[in-house]
Amino acid sequence: MHPTTSESAVSPRAFLISDHARLARLGEKLLISARAGDPPDVCPSWNEFEQGLLAHLEAEEVELLPHFEAGHRLETDALRLEHARIRHLVDKMGLSVELHEAKADALEELLRIIREHSAREENLLYRWTDKNLPPPLRARLLARLRRTVSQASPAPRPSEAPR
Ligand SMILES: [Fe+2]
Ligand SMILES: [Fe+2]
């Protein structure tokens, strides 16, 4: 990163990748509790994971995909479909968690799908974002992501984000 506090110097890709990593860490923590068959531990971790994940998907859909779509229609459609699939699985898992019936295998499958989706975004959508998203839209995206992360606790803040 450049040694500057200018918002336009912050890489949205780095910030978004940090958020993927944060969610992956929460997911791994959840998986450990689910494998241990520990419903009281699964619930609070699940809530934090679910909120963070849904906020991340929404930030991409509101602040990124409408701008990316013009030159990348097929890829945008594919990403939206993957978001819909992830939301469906998150809803199902949320219900299982409420009923204290969360299965480690189902959670593992959800985390695998999220991992593949994240890698896809990091390779194309986020590279495009760093190169092409105009500065005012970058600032909006970053402000939204910072709100998302600061509302979560006790997650660490992305290291790439200057204060
Ligand atoms: Fe996404
Ligand atoms: Fe993402």
Image (cartoon, grey):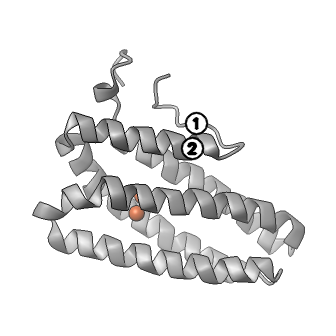
Q: Position of residue 64 (x, y in %)?
A: 29, 54
Report which residue position mark 1 lands on. Answer: 157
Tag of residue 79? none
Q: Residue furthest left?
A: 71
Q: Position of residue 116 (x, y in %)?
A: 43, 68
Q: Residue at x 60, y 39 (%)?
A: 150
Q: Using the image, determine if residue 157 lies above or below residue 116.
A: above
Q: Is 30 left, or right, of 79 in this rendering?
A: right
Q: Residue at x 20, y 55 (%)?
A: 67
Q: Nearer the viewer, residue 43 or 32?
A: 43
Give amino acid for label 1.
Arg
Give the label, 1 or 2, closer to the camera. Answer: 2
Q: Position of residue 12 (x, y in %)?
A: 35, 41
Quadrant of residue 11 within the rendered picture: top left
Q: Residue at x 38, y 18 (%)?
A: 5
Give amino acid for label 2.
Val
Quadrant of residue 101 within the rendered picture: bottom right
* Circle 2: element type: helix
